[in-house]
Image: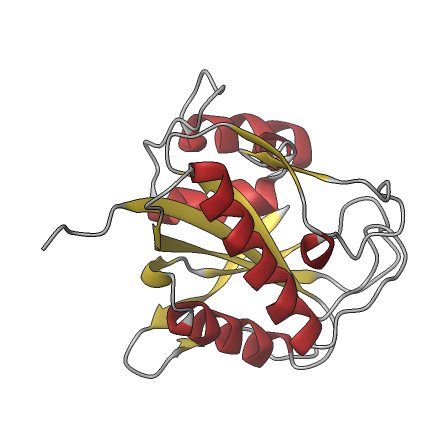
């Protein structure tokens, strides 16, 4: 029997509305339940300063490593995964709102193996961001990942030596550079993942 080919993908998780820690933990469990994917690693949980719209609560962010079935075209597999991510966001209560504004759950496809992808999104995978054009494209690696400490810090937990396609430095080197610009207090670890319990422990209180 031919073994199914898999691609290591990295998903960014975030939110700042409602019971955020519980929502993000449920998202990790839901990702592991997807028929096309299995969770292979979960980062620490981070409290991060909001970007873009600063007059809102701090975010909680994390990242997940997934092994994703990719027997056919990598772009098709990435689009299937993206569609699943958008469905999970909707199930968690995410609706169209202000760009960079508060949200209960944000799931971003950050990296999809060694593949650089530019593909038209199907309607079910369109962004909830109202500032994005109606005809949208999936860009992987995520075009903003290198510019956001809240993305890089969880990625460093999972793959510090990773050099995504098109990057010239590791995620660890990129994080160091971002913290020079954003400040060392831009991200702060507040919890560690317990795979047996399916949650983060020692996290900050929900009210932060």
**82 or 207, which is in the foreground?**
82
Q: Quadrant of residue 13?
A: bottom right
Q: Is residue 208 left or right of residue 200?
A: right
Residue drawn at x 43%, y 30% as measured from the top left: 115
Q: Position of residue 28 (x, y in %)?
A: 45, 70
Q: Is residue 84 above or below residue 17?
A: above
What residue occupies the far top of the structure in this picture? 168
Quadrant for the C terminus, please.
bottom right
Report if residue 60 is visible in the image: no
Q: Is residue 197 left or right of residue 145?
A: left
Q: Is residue 139 left or right of residue 25?
A: right
Residue 94, quarter of picture: bottom right
User: Which residue corresponds to the image point at 76% horizontal and 46% vertical from the top-left?
Assistant: 51
Q: Horizontal and vertical percent for residue 138?
A: 64, 39
Please name whichever residue, 102 or 182, is drawn nearer the observer in this view of the structure.
Answer: 102
Query: Nearest the camera: 181 or 164?
Result: 164
Quarter holding the N terminus?
Answer: bottom left
Q: Is residue 204 visible?
A: yes
Q: Tell me where residue 58 appears, x and y as whole percent.
A: 72, 61
**Residue reaching furthest front?**
1
> Which residue corresponds to the image point at 76% horizontal and 66% vertical from the top-left?
103
The residue positioned 35% from the left and 32% from the top of the image is: 162
Residue 206: image location, x then y, percent? 64, 79
Up-down: is 166 above or below 88? above
- The single residue placed furthest to the left in the displayed view is 1
């Amino acid at each position: 029997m031919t073994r199914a080919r898999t691609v290591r993908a990295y998903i960014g998780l975030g939110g700042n509305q409602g019971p955020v820690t519980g929502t993000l933990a449920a998202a990790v469990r839901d990702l592991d339940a997807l028929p096309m994917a299995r969770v292979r690693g979960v980062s620490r949980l981070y409290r991060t300063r909001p970007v873009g719209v600063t007059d809102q609560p701090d975010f909680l962010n994390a990242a997940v490593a997934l092994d994703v079935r990719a027997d056919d075209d990598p772009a098709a597999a990435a689009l299937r995964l993206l569609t699943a991510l958008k469905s999970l966001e909707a199930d968690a209560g995410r609706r169209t709102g202000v760009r960079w504004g508060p949200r209960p759950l944000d799931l971003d496809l950050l990296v999809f193996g060694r593949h650089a992808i530019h593909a038209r999104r199907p309607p079910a995978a369109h962004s909830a961001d109202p500032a994005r054009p109606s005809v949208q494209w999936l860009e992987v690696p995520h075009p903003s990942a290198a510019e956001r400490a809240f993305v890089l810090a969880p990625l460093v937990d999972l793959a510090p030596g990773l050099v995504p396609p098109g990057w010239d430095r590791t995620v660890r080197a990129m994080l160091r550079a971002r913290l020079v610009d954003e400040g060392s207090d831009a991200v702060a670890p507040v919890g560690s993942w317990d795979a047996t319990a399916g949650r983060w422990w020692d996290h900050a209180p929900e009210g932060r």
